[in-house]
Image: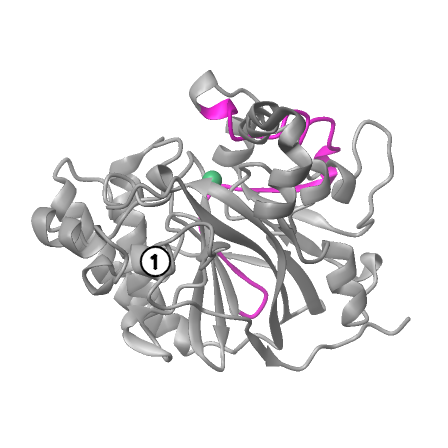
Amino acid sequence: MFTPISHFDDTRNTLRPMQRVDNVREAARDFRRDMLAKPKVLFYKTFELVRVPYPSKFAYLNAFGLPTPFVHLCNRLFVIQFSSSEGVKTLLVSPSDWEHQRATPFFAELDAKAGPMIGVLEALVLKKTSTVLQCLTSIGLRPEDIDYITYDHLHTQNVSRWLGANGRSAVFPNAKLLVMREEWESAQSLIPWQNQWYCPQGTQGIAPEKLELLDNSVWLGDGAVALVRTKGHTEGNHSIVAHTDSGLQVTSENGVSLDAYEPKHSAIRGLADFAKRTGAEVIINGNTQEYVVDQYISMIQEKSIAGPNPLDERFPNMVPSSEAQPYWLFPGTAPTLRTGNLEFGQLSLPVH
Ligand SMILES: [Zn+2]
């Protein structure tokens, strides 16, 4: 089920950062060629879950040129099916259990600041579109049909309901979590700089057999999906690459919009100027800034894998897991290009 990917081995084993950028860019070109020669996914569909406010100073680290304090991030779920030697497998990418993540210190602090105004503020800035289970029901998938779940990183996530924890049964009884070992171990023992963004108890008490801890990048099944290590936003974050009718689609949260991946073409105030002034090829999503040099390199890796976006070739074929959306209360934050909802292929419904 998991075949190691070696393209990026050793690309960062040099002391000179720009050499690392060049190595990664070249390896990404080879990887892209090899993945495009492999089969496509059988099914790929995105669903909007919820929109939440997120500080613009983090969203576009050091580059945003307006006083607007927040951008509006849309958390999405991806349902992907691919072939394997063990039959069709169903993977959920970024199934945020957003109804059970409010204990994350960042959210808890926002709630506390809002005080008695919480109801009004929530109505204004929180848009609850659907839950993971509602999305699955809408296409006829049952919880027991899910084979794998994965998140590009574990910020704010609470996987305990999905996988079962501390003796409670799992909502997805057959699902395993695909996660980089580094990310999982990090989430078990966070320093205060990191722990503002992780949901307390969100990864605690999970049975080890529910986890597939990965030590490197891997192809899944027949190679229509790849999980590629792209550390930086967190210690062990990865990107999900899916081969669809629209090319290679790359998902992560190293950047919060397509503008972040191609700031020189961005109409968002400050981004193009920042790119011109500094020569930066990407703008980092920097709430924790765990490994910013790696994050910069990883974003170049991601956009080199993704290739041009069919909607506008100036931008890469990225599909951020949390993508900034226009919102009247947050003026000047509308991205130049957005991915919208995507759907490719045919869903296979397991025989019930
Ligand atoms: Zn994050």
Residue, far top: 192
Q: Is residue 197 magenta?
A: yes
The magenta stretch spans residue 323: no
Q: Quadrant of the C terminus?
A: bottom right
* Colour treatment of the image: one colour
Q: Give the residue pinned by disc 1.
A: 302
Res. 305 visible in picture: yes
User: Which residue is found at the position 79% from the left and 32% from the top?
Assistant: 165
Residue furthest to the left in view is 277
For disc 1, the neighbor class at 10 Å (few under 14, some 14 to 19, many from 20) is: many
Query: What residue range appears in magenta?
Result: 194-222
Q: In which quarter of the image is residue 284?
A: top left
* Lateral position of residue 246 relative to residue 116, left or right: left
Give the vertical position of 245 relative to 79 (above or below).
below
- Image position of 111 (left or right of 308): right
Tag 1: amino acid? Glu
Q: In this view, does 8 lie above or below 61?
A: below
Quadrant of the image occupied by residue 88: bottom right
What percent of the width, then of the height, locates residue 274? 16, 49
Residue 101 appears anywhere in the view: no
